[in-house]
Amino acid sequence: MLKVTVSADVNPTENEDKVRDAVSNIFPNIDLEIEKFGKVQRLTGEGNISSLETLHYLIREEEIIDTSRTRLNVGMDEEGKFTYFIISKQVATVGRLNYPAQDEPLGSIKVFIDADSADEMERLLDWLTPPTEDGVSEFEMEMSEV
């Protein structure tokens, strides 16, 4: 079973509702809880594969399948059962998707995906970011196939 964990820092100069909206624009099915770490607060939530439906849609809408697949592979652990990537918090405020090269000054949206097996993670990658040829998906899977 897949576990998706999303988090985003809320800095003292930021509005919590705006950060919450930014995360919810990409992950609307995840309920976010606020945690406090000194002066910084963090919104965190967990979900499953259905939490990735909007991300799945945006990757196709913005035609960034190859970039997205690369980002997920870069964050993959050696066993192939875990991946991590970040999404621009600022860009997410307008419902768009961008993968910054590194954590942004005010923090990014951090996404962690755990799978029970490397095979399950591979199926997730193929559903979320299928291989392409000349920028066109070689196939499309249904979420139920993951």
Image: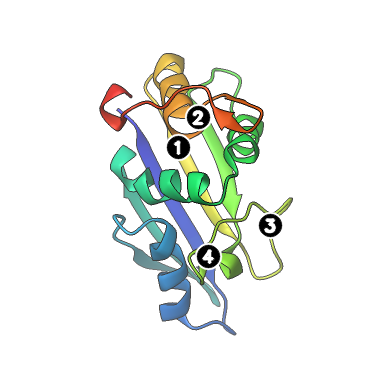
Q: Which mark is residue 103?
A: 3
78 relative to 38, above or below: above
Residue lying at the far left in this picture: please name it.
Answer: 144
Circles 2, 1 touching at the beta carbon (< 8 Å): yes
Q: How is the image coloured?
A: rainbow
Which residue is located at x 51 percent, y 62 percent? 8
51 relative position to 87: left or right: left
Asked if disc 4 and disc 3 are in contact, CB closer than 8 Å, the reply is no
Label 1 or label 4, whichever lies nearer to me, is 4
* Label 2 Cα crowd, 10 Å radius (few <14 / some 14-19 / many 20+): many
How far across and how far down the image is residue 144, in percent?
A: 25, 27
Q: CA distance from mark 2 to mark 1?
A: 6 Å
Between the C-alphas of marks 2 and 3, the distance is 19 Å
Determine the residue positioned at 49% across, 50% down.
61
Q: Tell me which label, 2 or 3, sits earlier in the chain.
A: 2
Q: Nearer the viewer, mark 4 or mark 2?
A: 4
Q: Earlier in the sequence, mark 4 or mark 2?
A: 2
In this figure, which residue is indicated by the disc labeled 4?
92
- Amino acid marked by disc 2: Phe
Label 4 sits on a secondary structure element that is helix
Label 1 CA crowd tier, 10 Å (few <14, some 14–19, many 20+): many
Residue topped by disc 2: 82
